[in-house]
Image (cartoon, rainbow, N blue to C red):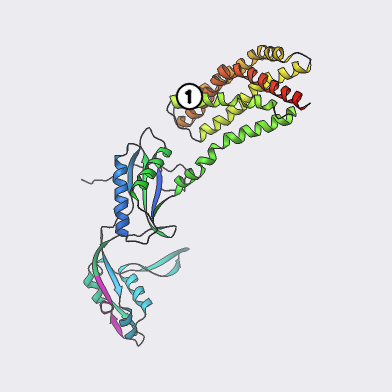
Amino acid sequence: NKDAFVIPVNPPPIMGMSATGGFELWIQDRTGGDIHLLDKYVKEIVEKAGKDPRLMMTRTTLNTNVPQYNLRVDREKAKAMGVSIASIFATLQSTFGQGYANDFNLYSRTFHVNVQSESKFRATAEDYRDVFVRSTNGNLIPVSELIHVKRVVDASVVQRFNMFTAAQITGNPAPGFASSDAMDAIKEISTSVLPKGYTTAWAGTSYQEDKLAKEGSYTSIYAALFVFLILAALYESWSIPVAVILSIPFAIFGAALAVYLRQLEADIYFQVGIITLIGLSAKNAILIVEFAMAKLEEGMPLLEATVEAAKLRFRPIVMTSLAFIVGTLPLAISSGAGSASRHIIGTTVVGGMISATVIGVLFIPMFFYLVITVKQKFSRTKA
């Protein structure tokens, strides 16, 4: 019977950025110390990560327990015997490894010629006695006379990151946790384990996520500022748009509450939903503010104009909001492939619009009344 060892891994969210999904963290040794000491700290991090409920499948590519041979060339002896150091390395590579010779064309194809000894002639350390290198005077010198072979246990591959000796740690978030939770967890563990002189650095999609985590949260601020500037140009006033902008927090509160209750992630789809809510909540506020401003221009007192605008525009706001909520509700309850992204954006928009309609509409007239009152008071004081 043939057996197989299978390890399932998630694909990377951005193809080409990494080999698998999850996080990718590098532990850097900036002290220039022994790699075995780095391996000790890395194993301690992986061990603690295995006990953290936020992480799963945490592993490292560093392995310092690989049996191997350490070959050291006696350069003084080689020079005394007239043997080029480059010839020794080329002979060892082409015999025990693989050496590139040349290319040739055949049947409209290009073939690479690689030189390598058969496996039975490079199986043991004693096979070095049968390999010769030619000196400058034409004599064949046994390679075993020019090298020292020592059996050691060391790292098979020494990796470097940012020019420092480093070890890679990869893993995935446990079910129910986001990638940001897993990154925070492995960062906390690494900080508690690593001494001074050892640092961490993200790579692949983890680097992009860490870099854009704070920038992504500014998107809603930029959107609200953009709406404020447009309204300021529309009303030719810096105070009236404040009444519209103050309605946005109600929509964001409803969206955040809905996403939290459904235990969804606040990812890029959540940001898209927030931007949509900023425009929709501002639209509802504009309907009331615009009508109230028209009543003020007709000579109606401020309080009566505000109440009249709230009464007349309440029904259109509720009707348009309900139509939008019902239209996006299938996104929040969808199923099938890709439903996770639809759940987030649908829940964000539905929850935000319900909050903006039920709570926000009641406070928009009050905000308008307060803003205009303050504006009129400052205008009288200035006069």
Say which residue appears at 78% left-offset and 14% top-offset.
299
Residue type, mark 1 in image: Ala
Residue 307 sits above or below residue 232 on the image: above
Say which residue appears at 66% left-offset and 20% top-offset.
370
**Range shown magenta:** 135-149
**Residue position marked by numbered label 1 in the rendering:** 258
Q: Is residue 7 visible?
A: no
- The quarter of the picture where residue 21 lies is top left
Is 346 displayed left or right of 299 in the figure?
left
Total residue callouts = 1
Q: Residue 244, position in %: x, y?
A: 65, 25
Q: Residue 78, position in %: x, y?
A: 32, 81
Extreme bottom residue here? 137
Give 81 or 309, whichever is nearer the viewer.
309
- For disc 1, the neighbor class at 10 Å (few under 14, some 14 to 19, many from 20) is many
Query: Is label 1 in a helix, a strand or a loop?
Result: helix
Residue 207 sits above or below residue 316 on the image: below
